[in-house]
Image (spheres, grey):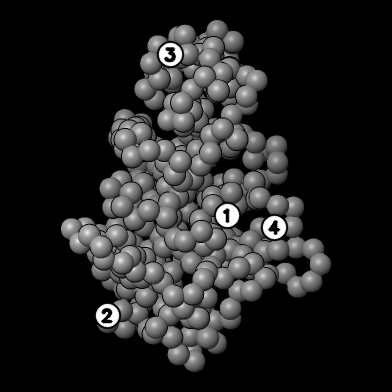
Amino acid sequence: MSETVLSVRDLSVVTSGDGSPETILDRVAFDLRRGEILGLVGESGSGKSMTARALIQLLPGSRLAISGGSALLKGEDILSLDERAMGAVRGGSIGMIFQNPSSHLDPVMSIGKQIAESIRFHKAVTGRTARDHAVEILRQVGIPDPERRYDAYPHEFSGGMRQRAMIAIALACDPDILIADEPTTALDVTVQAQILKLLTDLRDARGVSIIFITHDLGIVSQICDRVAVMYGGRIVELGGKREVIGNGRHPYTAGLVACQPAEGQPGERVRTIAGQPPRVGHMPPGCRFHPRCPRADGTCSAVGPELVSAEPGHSVACHHPIGPELVEAAP
């Protein structure tokens, strides 16, 4: 088994301010292994991006706060670090690839200088050394004529090239972990395939671990090694992609798989999961999926299930899982 790079336990985020706090992320726990691509999947609002932003302490709102848990990176709990120490982790040990590069690239600074700035901040090297390194990174991510493109601005790049530039910035300081937050959503199919291949090639060449956030199970089956399914701020199923996608034990996982468009059956209506995901301020008690679940009963509406083992390496949080009953506590 590969070395564990990141170990997250009981990560929770709550709302703060007026009124009673509400738990948005509820005891999220997973391990990330070296050279692994772990997919975080679920509908919009399931907590995928919130998990990523909590890990780097960049929560999307002043009324949100981390209320508990730990995230051990190289034996250090990065959730306990102050802002100055966390600044060294962001971009240094953990690189972030955002969904919309246009909103995260500085429009008045050249692409190359943005990469070099990160290198100089984290590695304290000279400007010339940072420039040479930035040009090499641009070459590695497939930017043509990187010496000339170093001086280009974001508006001079296509959507796919801007995403490559975001990946270059995230890779600039040789991080142990990349967090990719739906990096292919706005790209056409051909460019999407190129970006996915780039990420897997970088994983193979550098041994970097990747947390890949997506709602697309097709992408998950293509590039991920393991999958964590999230719903209502909780992980409801976790395991290898073949076990989770091919033999999902949680009714929500089974619903997501059933919603994928069928191949070779033109005209067939795409299936849906009845109801809507819960909203902040309206989280149901017990299992948060129970209002939409065809297997739910009174226990489900009263008691939130724990994540327990279905078989080695495959865990599910459900009182009435699909298949045999669960008997072991998950590690």
The CA distance from mark 1 to mark 4 is 11 Å
Residue of label 4: 65
* Horizontal side, residue 168 vs residue 251: left or right: right
* Residue 41 coordinates in the image, percent (x, y): 42, 57
Mark carried by residue 323 = 2
* Residue 218 coordinates in the image, percent (x, y): 31, 52
Residue of label 3: 146
Residue of label 1: 50
Relative to 169, say whether 30 is above or below.
below
Residue furthest toward the left? 264
Q: Measuring 59% from the left and 29% from the top, which residue is drawn there? A: 105
Q: Measuring 65% from the left and 36% from the top, which residue is drawn there? A: 87
Residue furthest toward the bottom? 298
* Horizontal side, residue 199 vs residue 64: left or right: left
Secondary structure under tag 4 reads strand
Q: Earlier in the sequence, mark 2 or mark 1?
A: 1
The CA distance from mark 3 to mark 2 is 53 Å
Relative to 126, say whether 18 is above or below.
below
Q: Earlier in the sequence, mark 3 or mark 2?
A: 3
Secondary structure under tag 1 reads helix
Q: Nearer the viewer, residue 33 or 146?
A: 146
Q: Nearer the viewer, residue 159 or 47?
A: 159
